[in-house]
Image (tube, rainbow, N blue to C red):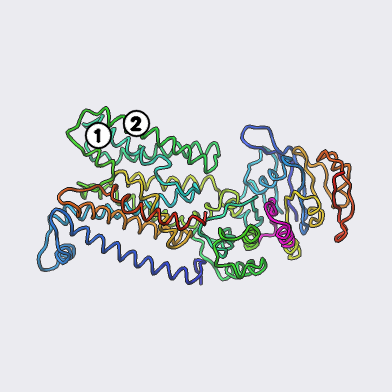
Amino acid sequence: MTEIGLPRSTTSRAVTLIVALVVLVIAAALWGISVGAVAIPVDVIVNTLFNLDGEQQTYIIIKSRLPRMVLALLAGGALALSGAIIQAVIRNPLASPNIIGINSGAALFALGMVLVFPAIPVAWMPLAACIGGLLAASFVMLVAHYRNLSAVHLALIGVAVGFVFQAGVDYLLITSSDSESSAPMIWLTGSLWGRTWGHVAISWIPLLALSAVALLLSYRLDLIALGEGTATGLGLNVPRQRLILLFVATMLASVAVAVVGVMGFIGLMAPHIARRLVGGSHRLMLPVSALVGMLLVVLADSIGRAIAPPIEISAGILAALIGAPFFVYIMLTTASET
Amino acid sequence: MSITLAGVTAGYGRDRAIVADIDLTIRTGEVTVLIGPNGCGKSTLLKTIGRLLKPRSGAIHVDDLDVLRNDPKRVARTIAYLPQSPVVPTAITVEQLVGYGRAPHQSLLGLRSPRDIELVDQAIATTGLDDLRARPVAELSGGQRQRAFIAMALAQDTPYVMLDEPTTFLDIRHQVETLDLIRQLHDAGRTSIVVLHDIAQAARYGDRLVVMHEGKIVAEGRPADVVTPDLLREVYGLECAVYPDPVSGTPVVTPR
């Protein structure tokens, strides 16, 4: 007989919470598919998704709204997991994929491809974003690894690298004379606008695989969060584990940024909400974090389409609008713990 | 059976070595206390044995186990190491923290066996944390936190335990509690190596003192033999009177 070593009440509470979150995520996704320029009743959605008798809306649902819901779920989960890993490794509550420069690195490379090399097919944009994110994070990670830097130094170098890439993004936007398309601006605010099955096809395998790896490493995250001294005493090769975990986190965020753009707030907020809900044990906190991230992105995207159809407001903007007040509330009520 | 250091030299970055060419044998079954002035290298030496710092040269063996060349998890099943002022994790309970002590004995996912549960319960009972086991570590007082971390090291169930300044930042009562706990470990058959600042406490609670000065070991032996006015003058640059403690009979130091 084995158990995961948490008080039974904590575990059963967490299981209840996870089930509740799954139900909420499904409900939000169904609502998200129903709202937009053309409102679709839920029974029509169910008929369409499961190919039942009765009225169906195959074109709008299958071609337009389902892929963006799938992407919202994948990206929301990935950004939240990435943020949770980075917060544990850097041991800084302010940490998120932003802090090791991933988002701006990804944004710079994707934008650079579109604006500087317009001949390259747009389908390559996600790959370019990945390269940028990995480049930014690798720089931070390699410097930290070879100079054996503390968590604080690592975070500070990450902030600096992020600013350099952000400066590049701003430069590209200012100097770009091509104003006929607002796509880059929309993408930079984090949006699911115009996402297709093509975007799902290039991202679902890496996102699911990386999420699985993240969950497998959740107990290591607990140990690494104890700091280098204690974790080393418990038999962890801390520099190596830190590198592996940050690599997983970077890939998760980069692939997500590649398909849904920059939604910086999810990676910061979802882990804090999860920690508040189930505590700091990552074996529970990581799955809850992923579910919270999914819920936030799905809700943000859906509300963005429901407010004033056919105009869409970017999910990234709404995620910050919905999440920020809740986030501030959490910070204020847990201030005494830190 | 012992910990042996042979020619260990260690330091940070490219700076000069903090500890140089250390030869030391820690005997099994004793409480060995490392003392010396600030910057003498005692914490650095402990970090080196704890694998937190890779030595530039030399060898470290625990029993027959080559500490520097072996799987870190395997070493962690033989020797426990608690750093000075360990990081207090957020939203982790005492029971969870003590449970981490079992990590070197567990697989990737940290699933607990009945033996793990038994040892965690034992460690919590030994350190008197039963009433606090469901409380977040971050909410505990300094003394209670230190007990929780010592309980974690206990649950690790290693024959050797190293503690780096476990009494720092504690008031006198909690210092004594912590030191009594170390004696308890000794009585339960564990060998401990402890870094302490207070010479009288070191003399009272240690079976053996190792005195360091400028990266070298300058004296080693039973407290009564080691703590002398001459040594204190040499190491701390302080003229002191040394007299027996009225309670324990071990040496106490008063500056002149």
The reply to whether discs 1 and 2 touch (Cβ–Cβ < 8 Å) is no
Q: Does B194 sit left or right of A272 as displayed?
A: right
In the displayed structure, would residue B184 be above or below residue A134?
below
Label annotation for residue B175: none
Q: Which residues are magenta?
A: B156-181
Residue B156 visible to an observer of this rendering: no
Report x, y in % for residue A164: 39, 32
Q: Is residue B172 magenta?
A: yes
Question: Which amino acid does the dot numbered 1 rest on?
Answer: Val
Question: Which amino acid does the dot numbered 2 rest on?
Answer: Gly
Q: Secondary structure at mark 2?
A: helix
Q: Nearer the viewer, residue B35 or A1?
A: B35
In the displayed structure, would residue B241 be above or below residue A289?
above
Report x, y in % for residue B219: 83, 44
Q: Chain of mark 1?
A: A
Which residue is at the far left?
A: A55
Q: Chain of mark 2?
A: A
Report x, y in % for residue A295: 31, 58
Please give the residue where the numbered disc 2 appears in the rendered image: A168
In the displayed structure, would residue A127 be above or below residue B122?
above
Q: At x 59% / y 69%, what residue is drawn?
A: B115
State which quarter of the image contains the N terminus of chain B. bottom right
Label annotation for residue A114: 1
